[in-house]
Each structure stands twice: as structure tokens, then as C-alpha cells.
Amino acid sequence: MCLLLSVFLNKFIAPKTFPYFGLSALVFPVLFIVNLIFTAFWLIKRDRVSIIFLIITVLLFFPFQKYVHFRGHYEKKNAPNMLKIITYNTHYGNKEKNLKELDEYILKQNADIVFFQEIYTRQWRSSEALLTDHYNAVFDLVGISSKYPIINKQKIILPGKGYACLADISLEDDTLRCFNLYLEPMSLKKSLFKPESTDDVTVKTKAVTEKLSDGFKKHQVQADILSRYIQESPYPVIVCGDFNSVPMSYEYFLIKDGLQDVFEQSGRGLGMTFYDYFYPIRIDCIFIDGNKFISKDCYVDKSVKFSDHYPVVAEIQIK
């Protein structure tokens, strides 16, 4: 119970002060389900302790919406001033066939702005380049592709293995500043989750904890830099990317400050975006300026498997 409630402390306590609260955010969905089971058990038993569990369940329901929504099918109503956004970690999908399929998928989706992570810069320079009829801003492993003119673009320098960029996109009467980010990867190998003996469980658990704790601290530095760029933007912002961290984490709250999580506002289904391990998690997000945009729809497209991530698709309306 205390571990569950500790996820709320991530908003206030930085990883460099105490990195282990980030672990509670990582296992939050599992802990929430366990809490539901205990709540149901005590309700059936009609024990007074069930009131405490029920109150906690209600409190935790709000952050749980960052992971799953039970909304029905979204009906498009051809509303004016709509933008379709996709963010997708392609995991270096550099095979010619994969690139062609990816290009076809994006064009079929008819997305207005697409944010790519873990994609090689040269894939926009070769004869087989992606989305050649779009305006593109590409730096290192991150790229933004737009149907609308990009009037300014800039690489954002992050320490370590984090990457980010921004692009100012000109609409008819507006300018938007789009941020694409890829925070430090945790560099966890699958072998760490396959202990060979009882003693090996302890060793590998310690190794995983240390890697995650170190990653959370690096995220804090990178998120601090990105947050300043976002807060100082002269234009309304859209922030997309692979956070390599989950909702309820410190870096999630820091980057989201003053913005809206599109999936939290209008998501459909499970929000899990990374599926390469046995434990699916949501680490790919789309944030918008709530003063400028209205979130209409958001879902994870699980039909697409070019990568170990699923693309996140959203529709937002310009106020």
C-alpha cells in the first residue's frame, strides 16, 4: 500500500535525491491490480479495512488512466482545424523493405506531423529516403516530418545518450513549436531477466536496480534541459517522443508541467507502447498545450510491428 502511494512522490522528489521511487512508478500497473484484488477480497469479507482499500483505489484510479482507457470507438466528425500526430520509435528500421513499408504506413495514415526516434539521419538523405514530399527536420536519432512548412529547426544538445530536436511549423495563421525527444535508454539486456540460479536472482536484481537508478538520474538532467526549452517557447508546443520512462515518473511530470497528456485526455484501450520484454510498458507519449489544442483521440496502433515499439496516433484540434 505504501509502495503504491509512493508513486505520487515522484512529482516532488528528484532521482538524484532518491532514485528508487522511480521503481514504484515502473511497477505501478501491477501493484494497482494487486490492490484491486485485495479491495475485492475485503469487500466480500465485509471487513472495515475494505474502506481504506476502497479509498486508496479511488485515489489511484486517476493515475491509472495514464495507462488504460475504456472509451469506445472514436467517430470522426470532420471537425475544422484538426491535426493528426504520430510518434514512433522505429528502432533503427533501416532495411529497404521496412523503410518502404513504414513510408506507406505513414502516408496511409495521412498524418500531419510525425515524430521519429531511433532512426538514422541518412534515411532522409538517400534515394530511398522517407517522406520525401514532406518538410523534414532530422538530427542524429530523432526526426520531425511535417506536411506544413518548417520555418526553423534546431538540435537540442543533451548529455549522455539522449537526443532531442525542435521544429517550428507554420500553419495558415499559427506557428507551432514541436519537440521530439529520446531520453537516455536504460540499456537493459534480456539476459538480466533470465537468472540461472537462486544466487543469480540476487545478483541480477541488483544489476537491474542499479541500471534503472542510474538511468533515472541521467533522465533528471536531460529533462531539466528539455523543460527549460519547452517553458521558454514563444509558440504553443507539441511534445512527443520516447521517454524511456513511464507515467508517474519524475521526468514525466517535469516535462509535462503545464501540458496535457493526450492519452490521458482521450486515450482508447491499453496505452502500452513497448512490448519487447515480457512486461509491456508505456514509454512513448504525446503532450500538448491545453490552451491551444483540444485532445480528440489517441490510441496505440498495435497492428504495426516494424519495431519493438508501437506507434502512438493522436488527433488534436486547434482552438
Image: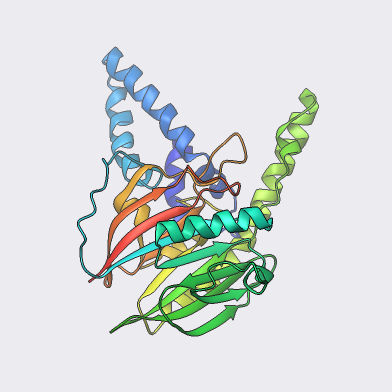
Left or right of 72? Residue 135 is right
From the viewer's side, name the closer residue of 11 and 183: 183
The residue under the point 57% across, 36% down is 279
Left or right of 26? Residue 141 is right
Q: Quadrant of residue 118?
A: bottom right
Left or right of 313? Residue 275 is right
Q: Quadrant of residue 83?
A: bottom left
Q: Where does the image place residue 106, in percent across and percent down from the top left? A: 47, 59
From the viewer's side, name the closer residue of 88 and 94: 94
* Tag count: 0
Q: Which residue sits furthest front? A: 127
The residue under the point 56% across, 48% down is 309
Asked whether residue 97 appears in the rendered view, the answer is: yes
Q: Where does the image place residue 146, in percent across and percent down from the top left? A: 45, 73
In which quadrant will I find the C terminus? bottom left
Q: Quadrant of residue 234?
A: bottom left
- Please tell me whether residue 225 is drawn above or below residue 265 in the rendered image: below
The residue under the point 21% across, 60% down is 78
Q: Where does the image place residue 241, in percent across and percent down from the top left? A: 51, 61
Left or right of 286? Residue 292 is left
Q: Which residue sits furthest top? A: 45
